[in-house]
Amino acid sequence: AADEVIARPDPARCGAYAEYVAVAASDVAVKPASLDHAAAAALPHASMTAWRALIDAADLAPGQTVLIHGAAGGVGSMAVQLAKWRGAKVVGTASGHNLDFLRELGVDEAIDFFYDEKGLAKAIQPLSDVGLGYVKLGQSSDTLSGGEAQRVKLASFLGKGRANNKILFIFDEP
């Protein structure tokens, strides 16, 4: 029997929507047996997005603290695991029904983002104190979804007076 695999084909080539596609062996990994094909298909993109933000852009190091907003989502859950692997302290936000999942992933602090806004502000104040700010989404605010608008508000709160510092946020749709 053939191995079931997942891949993220080179975006410069066409054919990713085909039933069959030729890819470099280095772009292929064995599909986790516990995942169906649809869930496994999301792994390469979500993992790469989290890697590029935490490892390539932020060079996350052991002992640093990272806030992952939307930590129960595809990119967020991968970011939690990568950050823990790098030895960082992880604060993750999610809806209340996802907090147990965040704890299973290994977050140091799971915050119900919508439960207590004052509690959230207090919990993430140390991150604001060290210079976290915000990234621009590149679109008009009147076209943002409710979740995107919430993230922009959070980023704006954290970014007040921090324009000269290094800034990193991971935004992920829940």
Image: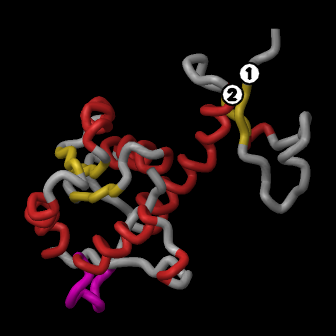
User: Residue beneath label 1, please?
Assistant: 4
Where does the image place residue 100, in percent across and percent down from the top left?
26, 31
Question: Residue at point 30% right, 46% down?
Answer: 95
Name the element at disc 1: loop
Q: In this view, which residue lies farthest toward the top? A: 1
Query: Would you say the residues marked 2 and 1 are in contact, meaning their CB atoms lie under 8 Å apart?
Result: yes
Q: Is residue 173 above or below residue 104?
A: below
Q: Residues within 10 Å of mark 2 (few under 14, many from 20)?
A: some
Magenta stretch, residue numbers: 158-166
**Distance between the alpha carbons at the discs numbered 2 and 1:** 9 Å
Residue 131 position (above or below residue 79)? below
Whichever of labels 2 and 1 marks the residue nearer the N terminus, that label is 1
Disc ID at residue 59: none
Find out whether residue 165 is within the magenta segment.
yes
Q: Say which amino acid is labelled 1.
A: Glu
Q: Is residue 171 left or right of residue 62?
A: right
Amino acid tagged 2: His
Which of 143/168 is in front? Answer: 143
From the viewer's side, name the closer residue of 139 and 131. Answer: 139
Residue pictured at 71% horizontal, 33% vertical: 6
Magenta stretch, overall SS: loop
Q: Is residue 125 shown in magenta?
A: no
Q: Which residue is mark 2?
A: 37
- In the rendered structure, the answer to whether residue 90 lies left or right of residue 3 reads left
Q: Give the image location of residue 96, x and y in percent.
A: 25, 41
Q: Residue at x 59, y 40 (%)?
A: 43
The image quadrant where one finds the N terminus is top right
In percent of the image, x 75 and y 18: which residue is there? 3
Residue 75 in picture, x, y percent from top left: 48, 50
Q: Is residue 16 left or right of residue 133?
A: right
The total number of labels drawn is 2
